[in-house]
Each structure stands twice: as C-alpha cells, then as structure tokens.
Amino acid sequence: MTVSSIENALTHHIRQIVETHFDKNHFKVFSFVFSLITCLCAASVLIISIFTPWLIQYLNYNQFVINIIGAFIAIGMYLPLPYLGYLADVHGPVILAVLSLFMFFPGYMVASLVVRDNLHYIYLCISYGLIGCATSCLYFSSLLTCAKVFPNHKSLSITAPVACYGLSSLLLSGLLDSVNWFYYENGDLNLYRCFRFFAFFYFVLGVINWVSSVIVTIERDLIFEEEQIPLIEPDDIHKRDFSVFLKDHSMYLFLFAFFLIVGPLETCITNIGSITTVIDPNGRKAIPLQVSLHAIFSTTSRILVGGSLDYLPKIGVTPVHLMIVLVLSGTLAFTLITQGSHMDLISIFLGFSYGGLFAITPNILVSIWGIGIFGSSWGLFMLAPAAGSTLFGLLYALNFDTMCKVESRFCLWKVFSALALCTVTSAIIIFFCNKVWAKRNAFKC
C-alpha cells in the first residue's frame, strides 16, 4: 500500500538514506531500542510534584492553582489522544514524533519565562498543556513503533515501552536530585534552569524519535504479512472496525471503570507532594523519596504484569483478574491515606496500581478489539484520565485548601474515603465486563 502524502513528506528523505546505507533488520532493532530510550526519558511531566513546593514558595500558588495546572496537564496529555491515535493509524507514528518536537520546546521555554518573570499562572497552565500533549505524542509514537514493528510479540512490544515510561520519572527525578547545577547555592531548586534544560533536551530527543519512527513506514509490507492487517488501513476498513468497537456496550462499562480508578491515581501523582507534607513527618524533604518509590514500584508493576501475560491463561487467570488486583491495590493506598500514616507504603501501593494498570489496559484492548484500531481505541480510553484527574483533582484541592490549613495527618480522610469507594466500584464493573467477554470468548490472544 502507498503511504499517505503527509507520511511520505515526513519520511521520504530519511527512508532514502536508511534504504541506501543501512540494513533494514539492523535499523529495525535500532528503532526499537531508541523508542525504548525515548520512553525512558519521556515522563518529565510526571515529576511536577518535585516542582510544586517551589511554585508555592516562590510564586505563592495554593493547592487549587496546582490542581488547575494538573488539569491542564491531563487535558493536554489525554484529551487529544483519540485524534492523535487516528492520525497515527492513518499516517504512521512519525506524525506524532514531529508534533512532540514542536510542542515540547515552546512549552518548557514558556514555563521558564513564567518562573523567571513571575507571570500569571495561566501561562504556566498553557505551557504545561503543551508539555502534556507533547508527552503523549512522544510516548505514543514510541509505543506504536514498538507495537507495530514487532506485532507477533505483543507482550514484549507493548509492555517494554510502557515499563520504560514508568521508569522515566525515577530517572529524571534522580537526575534533578543529583546534579547541583539545578540548584541555587542555598539548596533551593532552580526552576528556570530545570525548564530550560528540558526544552533543549526534548528538542534533541524529538529529532531522534522522528528518525526511529520511520521504520514503521519502511516495514509496512512485512507487518502486513505477519499480522494480516495493514499498518495504514483504508479509511473504510478503519471506520468499520472502529464502529464495531464503539457499538460494543461492554466497552463503555470498561471505560467508566477505568475512569473511576485512573482519575484518582492521576490526582495522587499531581498531589503527591502535598500528600507527603501532610502524612510524612519529614515533610517537604521526603518528596523526592516518595516520587522515587512511586516510580520504582510503578515500573516493577509494569514489568511483572507484562511478563505474566503469556502465562496467565495456563493457570486459568485472565488479564482482567489481574487488573482487578491492581485496582484493589489503589483502594488499599487510599485507605492508608485516610489513616494518615505509612507514606512509604502509600507510594508503593499507588505506584504498583498505577503502573500495572497502564501496562495491562492496552493489552486488554488489543486482545478484545485487535491491534488494527489500537491507536484509536487506546486514544479514546485516554479520555478517562483526562476527565478523571480534572474532576478528582479539583475535589482534592477543595478538600486540602479548606481542611488542611491547620496541620493534621487526618485532614484528607473525607476525599480519600470517597476515592476508595470509587475504586471498589471500578473493580465490580471490571469483574462484570470479564463475565461478558468470557461468555462470547472475546479474547483474541
């Protein structure tokens, strides 16, 4: 099949160089490896909790403003994903790589100007909206490159980039914590330098990702033979398959269940700094540790989940059963928050739940509805964290700004009791969906 005119324009010269000077199989491995490296560096948006105490100290923000910024991040990361997924299905992941290149740089440059010149927080909201969208483009491009270059190894090709993305926040927080250049002489974090660094860092990374994603275009014929599905499907075929997906009532139940668990988890990522200051006796000094614990167990969960998917059917366990366990791990974390203790365990359970859910949900979507519309189906499901983190984040901010003015380990119990109830409801809905899918033998792998 011929490539689209947009994809041809974005890949033509690179394809000529690759096909002339490189072995295709070697370049295939190169693209897979560099897509994983891209995922390892993509999640700077997830370490915003490291920045929030300094935004509060230097720019006088309150928790409501922090969650407005978090809402813009979620909107930027998730709201465009259905359209981005469609673009990737039709024009290849290269278009997402290019879009990330032209959003990361201005996003972080504007953020650096906001903290330097103390501009209105709406500019930081807009910049982080761009950064959120750029993050999704960069990560989604790499994820699709891995998934569609090695379509016969779905567990590895999907789980590996998901795991690397989970590890990204750990690596980036460790970088900020260990390099003195990012700090003032008095030990305070220099946000201006941090944002400037990320602007140029992601410009370089975006160029590399642009090149590595071209392999999907080059390898289309091979993928067609392996999967019996063309990478760039004709519009009528794509619309037919996606229409079947949209008419499936169980999909909407599953989407709602995903909303009820991932929204609260996203809220915790945005607010892990303030949660730590309430619960951990070490206060602000403990934030980097809690971010690292979350990242470590998020990555561990992604790896364990991905590694177990091929073996679960042999013991009579479906991926959905494992997903319910991950949801209940989040319930346990929220219950501990209501008790105002064990911050380390809270971060561990939150990370385990968050990472595992983002590893297993794409696999369930591929297994039930196929890889041919994966870009569009996963993009649609990303509306859940966009809406969920916005709604639950504002509820958290309202609770925090009214109940936590006077220090108390128990000031968060109301909002997190409600969030725990949401996650239990999510687990019940997912269990029902599994019953529906089992009756019609819906799993394709």
Image (cartoon, helix red, strand yellow):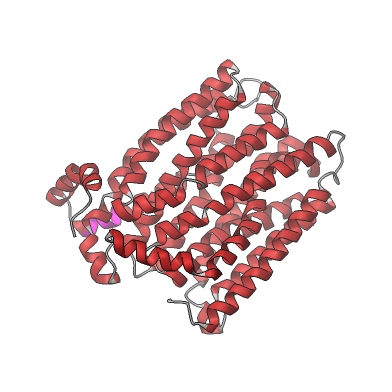
Q: Quadrant of residue 270?
A: top right
Q: Quadrant of residue 230?
A: bottom left
As for residue 398 lying within the magenta part, the answer is no
The percent coordinates of residue 145 (x first, y second) are: 34, 55
What residue is rendered at 47% in x and 32% in y?
A: 198
The location of residue 91, given as percent across then percent down, is 29, 51
Q: Report the quarter where the N terminus lies.
A: bottom left
- Where residue 290 appears, as percent x and y from the top left, is 68, 46
**Vertical placement of residue 23 versus 267, above or below:** below
The quarter of the rendered structure image containing the C terminus is bottom left
- Judged left or right of residue 162, residue 177 is right
Q: Which residues are magenta?
A: 25-30
Question: In front here: 438 or 217?
Answer: 438
Q: Quadrant of residue 257?
A: bottom right
Residue at (56, 35) in percent of width and height: 176
- Numbered circles on residues, count: 0
Q: Is residue 250 visible?
A: yes
Is 65 situated left or right of 212 in this image? right
326 and 286: which one is in front?
326
